[in-house]
Image (cartoon, helix red, strand yellow):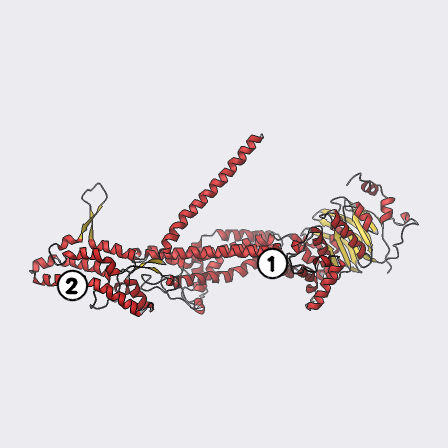
Amino acid sequence: MNEVIQMKRASRFAGPEEEDYSTRAAHVKTEEFSVFYGGFEAVKKVTCSFPESLVTAIIGPSGCGKSTLLRAINRMNDLIPSCRPGGKMIFSGEDIYCKNIDVVSLRMRVGMVFQKPNVFPKSIYDNIAYGPRLQGIRNRSQLDEIVESSLKQAAIWDEVKDRMTSNALGMSGGQQQRLCLARALAVKPEILLMDEPTSALDPKATTKIEDLIGQLRGQYTIIIVTHNMQQAARVSDLTAFMYEGNLVEFGPTRKLFTRPREKQTEDYITGRFG
Amino acid sequence: MRLETRRLLDRAFSGLGVIAIGVMALALIVILTPIIVKGSGAFVFRSTVEHRKVMFDQWDRGNPQRIEADKAAAAEARQPVYDMLSAFDAELKAMPRKERSLYKKPLRELEKALAELLGPVPGEHTPVLIRQQYGATRWDRAKIKLDELLYTEDWDYSNPDALGVLVKTPRVEQFRGTALEPLFAYIKENISAMMRPRWTFYWQFLFDTSKDSHIFGGIGPEVLGTIYLTLGAMIFAIPMGVIAAIYLCEYSREGRVVSFLRICISTLAGVPSIVFGLFGLAFFLNTIHISNSKSVLAGSLTLSLLILPTVIRASEEAILAVPHSYKEAALSLGSGRWHTVMTVILPAALPGILTGTVISMGRAAGETAPIIFTAAVSVGRPLMPLEALSQPTPALPWNIYNLSTEHEAVDEIRHVQFGMVFTLVALVLLLNLFAIVMRARISKKLRG
């Protein structure tokens, strides 16, 4: 099935100068998807789809539910006892909130980079090899190969190749975050989720991460949550704007930032609130 | 608040802190100094020739030639004493019967005091009890025995309004004008030659089995028993405690049952240890008959129950202190719950778990009440590991109590008691030191 970008009343706003993403297949799709924390509805019946191989940014003010939506994609919200989902979240054609879904194998297919660098207190090598080892890879040379290629993909190989056995916590914050990215890539995921990956980093390290996102574009479907609107504008193909749990607007980044359809979006990107 | 006020408050508070720490340090010194000083007396002391005889006869220690020479020199110095005794004997035989009976009691007392100082008279039959086969083995004891020989003690109760007064009279008064009159001056003059004191480092005190209920020898079985009991308690308590903590932190859903469980654990931590001891007796020994008599196994199980709440609490806190982000990272990479616990959470929580565990290990090593009913006996031999399943053992905490209250010759063996206290304190301190070092090393490894 040829999934198209599903936006509420999207057709009205599709202009001729927009790059045509409508032919792209949806990698992740939500249908009337909600998340409740106890009685509180943090994500309200969101219907949208994230196309394959593109970078989609989710922006919005604090507490708008963007992180909750992102974390629903690899079911990290399961860790919160009071949290329960509603509606459908479809990943590669499967509803991941179905009863017979294996969460562990789902998470192997969905990589994630968190807000704060969260390297394990182990050696750099063991950090990267953690995921592959989980998948049962024990062969040393095979592991070496995966570690090297992942570190190269995350553009950190040259910095760490001589100290693979030293503790990862000894690296700088920016390096740690790229190591986290490499660690996520080492399990060969189909999709990468990034939850404000640069909010704890300085501008230089932020630039490096943004460059990496640019390089990884096309190989992975990337969904990035960010506070920083310039960042969203720089790195993403598509942008979703959320406000108080609702998906207000979802469209090609350039259009959303230049000619927003909704008043709320315009107010937010021009800095009137948020 | 004004700047001066704030400064004053700060200064007052830091002053209080310094005072508090000073008081603690002082208390520590006041407690530890006598333990160390008196306790080391069990290991390093001036031994007499009698000590060397005991070592040679009972443990086959020492150079035979040197000991023979030692014994010969001492015997030579002692010979005049025995000569005087036989001269007095001859004198007695010559006396009229009435006069002779006057000397009967003083002579018996003198002979007893002499035997306590020098051992039995050579050539007479050997006494049955080992304690009567030797004189004073330590120079400090020898000096006390000498005092008892030279003076008789009496209590003067003539004033009914005051407490009794101790009156010491020289024993020589009883033997004025007899062949024994020069004996006392002679012994006083030649005590060194008769006892031959020499500084000794008796390190085997830690390993020797005691002879004649701790009057001779060391505390080997007690030390070994304490180690068995402590290790046994750890073998049961650590796996149970850590698994329980993992379950409570990572698997259980917060609810009424879990809250109730937590309350139970806290309550268990506050139960007096004697109750655990009685429980151990009633359950492990009388109900499920884990062994026919008291045994190390029953004692270990009881101790492990005693420290279980502490281990659970410490492990729980250590596990909760592991950053949530580690868990998220592991799960996001496709790790299962069990695997996350084993590869990420437990290694990061290890320093905390270790500290809590070793502290409770110190507690298990020092507890007396739980083992009174389940494991401890006052005298025993060192056990083989397998015997620990069915045999009781002496153990330091129980034997300290036993030696200071129930022993028939408490005053004779104060040094053993001090030595035991010293060893127990040293053992617990060593365990804590080990925990601190391990913790520092693991934390350093984790911190990178």
Above or below — where is B5 with respect to A59?
above
Query: Residue under mark 1: which chain is it in?
Result: B
Q: Give the residue type that dot 1 points to.
A: Pro
Q: Quadrant of residue B79?
A: bottom left
Residue A175 % position (x, y): 71, 53
Left or right of A66: which side holds B231? Answer: left
Spatial separation of the CA atoms under disc 1 and disc 2: 77 Å
Residue B377 % position (x, y): 38, 62
* Residue placed most toward the observer, A227 or A178: A178
Q: Residues within 10 Å of mark 1 (few under 14, many from 20)?
A: some
Label 2: state its secondary structure.
helix
Left or right of A14: which side holds B311? Answer: left
Q: Residues within 10 Å of mark 2 (few under 14, many from 20)?
A: some
Left or right of B173: which side holds B338? Answer: right
Quadrant for the C terminus of chain B in the image: bottom right
Residue B141 % position (x, y): 28, 56
Q: Quadrant of residue B132?
A: bottom left
Q: Specify the farthest residue to the left.
A: B96
Query: Residue under mark 2: which chain is it in?
Result: B
Which mark is drawn over residue B83?
Answer: 2
Identify residue for label 1: B347
